[in-house]
Image (cartoon, rainbow, N blue to C red):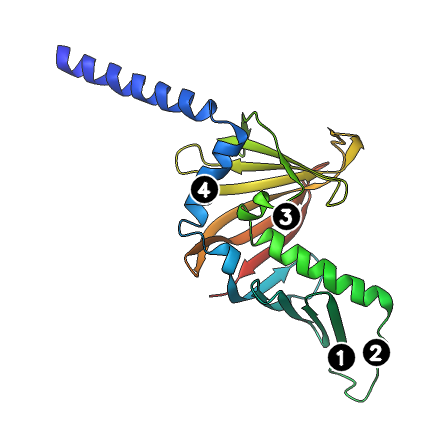
Amino acid sequence: MKHSYLFLVLIAFAKAYSQQTSLQLTGPQLLEKAIAYHDPEGNWKEFVGSLEIVTMMPDTEEQTSYVDINLPAKSFELISKRGDIVNEYRVFKDSATVAKMDLSKPDSIINITPEDAKRAGFMKNYYTYLYGLPMKLKDKGTVISYETERKTLNDKEYLVLRADYDPSVGSDIWFFYFDPKTYRMEAYQFYRQKEPRIKNPKTGEYILLSEEFKINGIKMPKVRVWYYNKDNKYLATDTIVD
């Protein structure tokens, strides 16, 4: 009986010590552990790969996106199709090309505007950022908070990392939620700024991550489900197709 009691005490002590150690991690330390989980071989910086992503939104036709990322060549390609509308964005270094088609009207011409070229750059940054997380948090202009905290989301406790950005890079405030045992990224959340470094709680979205898609030694979240912060309203689901 004494041995059983001692065993339970040791387990409780080990659990408490583990939690305390995790909580004491600094922001940079937590980031390193998360990167070690998602990109253990350090392959992201030389990433070359393709993704097929299906996006579903309420009251909207399903969209399929084909994404090609080649970081060494500084090239990006996105072909998205929703219904009969196809958009193509290609970025090579500092140049961008755009094409639009309506498959129901093959002879029609869809005008391309300067805003479309800007959107090509936006789409490149969007896909490489979200699918390059958490490795992208090492990019220049990202300010990682030294302190970490514990937060509960959907009845699970996480280690949370905060990231702010140099104004030349971005203005949103981001929070990243990691499993305290494996350091797997399972959610992230962003807010607009109410004033410098102060979040506006009525803005932004949170994204729940589930399953995994392994490519080039990197573990990416396979499913992303988006919600608004202000009212928890469902927004969309993105799924990588195997």
> Camera-side residue: 5 or 88?
88
Q: CA distance from mark 2 to mark 3?
A: 31 Å
The residue wearing badge 4 is 184
Q: Give the mark toward the camera: 2 or 3.
A: 2
Q: CA distance from mark 4 to mark 2?
A: 43 Å
Q: CA distance from mark 1 to mark 2?
A: 7 Å
The residue wearing badge 1 is 101
Q: Position of residue 161 (x, y in %)?
A: 56, 33
Q: CA distance from mark 3 to mark 1?
A: 28 Å
The type of residue carrying mark 1 is: Met
Contact check, label 3 and label 1, Cβ < 8 Å = no
The type of residue carrying mark 4 is: Arg
| Residue at 84% over, 64% down | 115
Q: Position of residue 235 (x, y in %)?
A: 68, 50
- Is residue 219 positioned above or below 137 on the image? below
The type of residue carrying mark 2 is: Ile
Position of 206 with respect to 87 (left or right) is left
Secondary structure at numbered mark 4? loop
Dot 4 or dot 3: first in sequence order is 4
